[in-house]
Amino acid sequence: MLSRITALLLTLLFTAAHAAVPPSQKQLRQQAVNTLRPHVLTEAAWALQQAPVTVTASSSPRSAGGPHDFFSEGDYWWPDPANPAGPYIQRDGMTNPDNFVAHRQAMIRFSRIVGALASAYQLTGDEKYARHALRHLRAWFTDSATRMNPSLLYAQAIKGRFTGRGIGIIDTIQLMEVAQGVLVMQVAKSFGKDDVAGIKSWFAQYLTWLTTHPYGKDEMNAANNHGTCWAMQVAAFARLTGNQELLRFCRERYKTVLLPTQMAPDGSFPLETKRTKPYGYSLFNLDAMALLCQILTDKNDNLWAFQTPNGRSIRKGIEFLYPYVADKSAWPFPKDVMYWENWPVAQPFLVLGAVQLASPAWLATWQKLEHTPQVEEVVRNLPVRNPLIWLN
């Protein structure tokens, strides 16, 4: 009898111990891949049917640039009712529906296409995805008739005030998944050496502009999500081009500037929560911080594990915001003045954080959220729509 009881106790102890073992990083990543697989293949099937559309396909009479220059307008700027023909006036948080957005839409579409094709290529190894992506990449970066200039002189212009602003650099967060897609697909047989060199040369030129032009310097020093997104872009493009100096610069900037100056002791972002869209901006900035950690972490420097001397870290940021993603009704700040009902979606910080920091709860919440948002404002502010290519 005693031996049977002992055996039963040992079995129970073994079962409990086995059940208590959390899933590994590899297991969590595989769960994320399994969730993404049907979406990836559906998006890639759509992408295979799309022809390239670049900035040269549309133009605005309000642009001070040429046919190869990206142009956009400040979102929250409107005609002055007291002076309709005069300079625009600001209505923070309220998007002007009459702004020129065709270039922005084309770049988002480009990002969506390349991200989907790169994801499908990573899943299947099928060359058809890489071949079709290359058509779009050539059109945007190397074809002299349709390419975009590697600068952003005319982004987020304001009628009657500015022909372009440094703040417009945030528009090219859409090129991050393009750069990451090239990293994934550059080993494909379809990608010739000249193609890869030409694409990387475009990004190297854009990096030079981002880091030397006054607009780029202004955006680098922005105190809120704009500063985060400058570093996120520079990091993504520097990794593609192998620019180790800029990668080191971005690591130090994350550690010594972005994290300590933007995050409060509780993990919130006060510069975002004081805005007219505190929820959406908080999600957006945390996504950007998580992407920085994902891009910049290497075998010698794990930013996912980094914390400042006073305890600020990416984990603290996710732990602060996660409860309000799981239950938005508990949000302690004012509701966003626009698009409150459209957030959250499948936020990148959830899936990347779940895998890197071993949190099944974060992954489970991410799995339940919307993976194919259709609202343009949400899509524009979701820097990663194809997390599969970032998970390696």
Image (cartoon, rainbow, N blue to C red):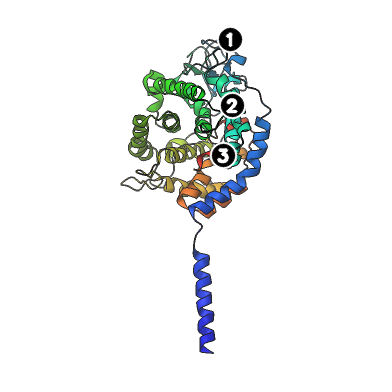
Q: Residue at x 52, y 14 (%)?
A: 69
The percent position of residue 236, horizontal first and vertical second, equals: 45, 32
Distance from disc 2 to disc 1, alpha carbons, whole Å, reads 23 Å
Q: CA distance from mark 3 to mark 2?
A: 18 Å
Residue nearest the observer in this picture, 222 or 198 = 198
Q: In the rendering, at what x and y percent does residue 242 appear?
A: 40, 30
Q: Amino acid at mark 2?
A: Phe
Residue 320, compared with residue 193, is above or below; it is: below
Which residue is denoted by mark 3 in the rendering? 122
Sooner in the amino-acid sequence: mark 3 or mark 2: 2
Left or right placement of residue 341 versus residue 191 in this view: right
Q: Nearer the viewer, residue 23 or 223?
A: 23
Q: Residues within 10 Å of mark 1 (few under 14, many from 20)?
A: few
User: What's the CA distance linking mark 1 and mark 3?
Assistant: 41 Å
**Which part of the image, by quadrant, shows the N terminus?**
bottom right
Say which residue label 2 marks: 110
| Mark 1: secondary structure | loop
Instruction: Kindly indicate the quadrant of the structure image that contains residue 215.
Output: top left
**Residue sitting farthest toward the bottom:** 1
